[in-house]
Image (tube, rainbow, N blue to C red):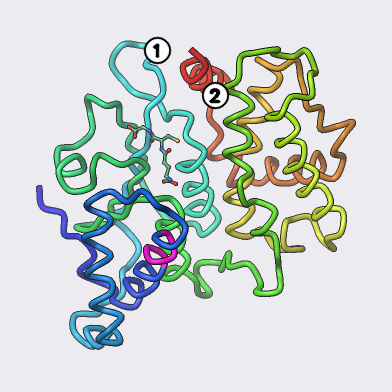
Amino acid sequence: MSVTKNNRGRSFNIVLCLMVMMTMVTSFTMSPSTSQSTSTCLEMIRTKGLERTVDSATPEEGGMTLLVKAGPSTDGTSLPVGDCPFAHSIRLVLEEKGLKYQVQPCSPDTKPEWLVDYYEGKLPALRHRKECYVESSVIMEYLEFFFSSDSYPSLKPPKKCNGEDVLDGFFPAVAQYLKDTSGDGAGEEDEKLQNLRDKLQGIEDHLAGIDGSFLCGDDFSLLDCRLVPQLYHLYVASQEFKGDIPNWKEDYPSLQTYYESCTSRPSFQATLYPEETIIWGWSQARS
Ligand SMILES: N[C@@H](CCC(=O)N[C@@H](CS)C(=O)NCC(=O)O)C(=O)O
């Protein structure tokens, strides 16, 4: 099966390149393949993207498959959607835009060969006809870049919205807290819980100061698509493993209202996977 990498939509490639370069600045560990694509990126930026004039057909709807981590099989044959919040974020974008797509849950044994050979087996991965993109933030930007028009609502947060700042480091804080098995549910204010509380308070304060139901006001945006699947994990797993600490209803009322608004949206309802899948995932991470 042939999948070509990034040979269409040159202007999106520029965006992608800038994102890879930004990752370079903030990250010290680069995989060899990322470094390779960065050198191509640098070349494109040096030529000021002149390649743009050649072969720049805009991607069209159709032929999209989102490959995602699979959950545990209940019948021994079919694989359900797994517990990945990053894959869930992409599905929210696809649903909000009304794009048609298929979901292909993959276990380590069922990943397609081309994904392993050319994309390090990374999940989630968006296959769009003969191309493929990995890294949820890149995929979400790809969808936003090419599918924002009268037919596909834009989810771009307004420039003046600083919602991004309060999301910074949120999921790592969630993961560190949930993975820690010492003192589960005892309410001890250890470092990990305190770090998570700081992040939640940042979101709470931001939401309390917003005029509207979502992170950037009245319109549901890419930032909400990013945050809500992560909140779903915390909501379920903190009840299961941490004695319902932290308790949103009591401690973070604006966050609770926000969560209810987001999870009642058709996009969330259409992509909802069972709580048991989240519990399965964190049980593995905690063992
Ligand atoms: N930074 C990556 C993180 C992706 C990630 O952590 N994916 C995990 C689950 S959430 C996964 O699919 N693991 C299974 C695998 O790679 O086979 C992104 O945002 O796409």
At label 2, counting other C-alpha atoms closer than 10 Å, the crowd grade (few under 14, some 14-19, many 20 or more) is many
Q: Does 276 appear above or below 224?
A: above
Disc 1 packing (10 Å; few <14; some 14–19; many ≥20): few
| Displayed-image quarter of ligand 1 | top left
Residue at 70% from the left image edge and 65% from the top image edge: 162
Q: Position of residue 83 (x, y in %)?
A: 48, 29
The structure residue drawn at horizontal position 81% and vertical position 32%, both measured from the top left corner, is 248
- Across and down, in percent, residue 100 comes to 40, 53
Residue at the extreme front of the image, as rendered: 28
- At x 22%, y 53%, the residue is 33
Q: Is 72 displayed left or right of 276 in the figure?
A: left
Residue at horizontal 80 percent and vertical 44 percent from the top: 201
Left or right, 14 with reference to 131: right
Q: How many marks?
A: 2
Is 20 a magenta residue? yes
Start-end of magenta stretch: 19-23
Tag 2: residue type? Ile
Q: For the residue labelled by badge 1, is the local secondary structure a helix, a strand or a loop?
A: loop
Tell me where residue 8 sits by quadrant. Answer: bottom left
Tag in front: 2 or 1: 2
In what element is the residue under mark 2?
Answer: helix
- Residue on which disc 1 sits: 74
The amino acid type of the residue labelled 1 equals Thr
16 vs 251: above or below: below
Residue 265, position in %: x, y?
66, 46
Figure quadrant of residue 172 = top right
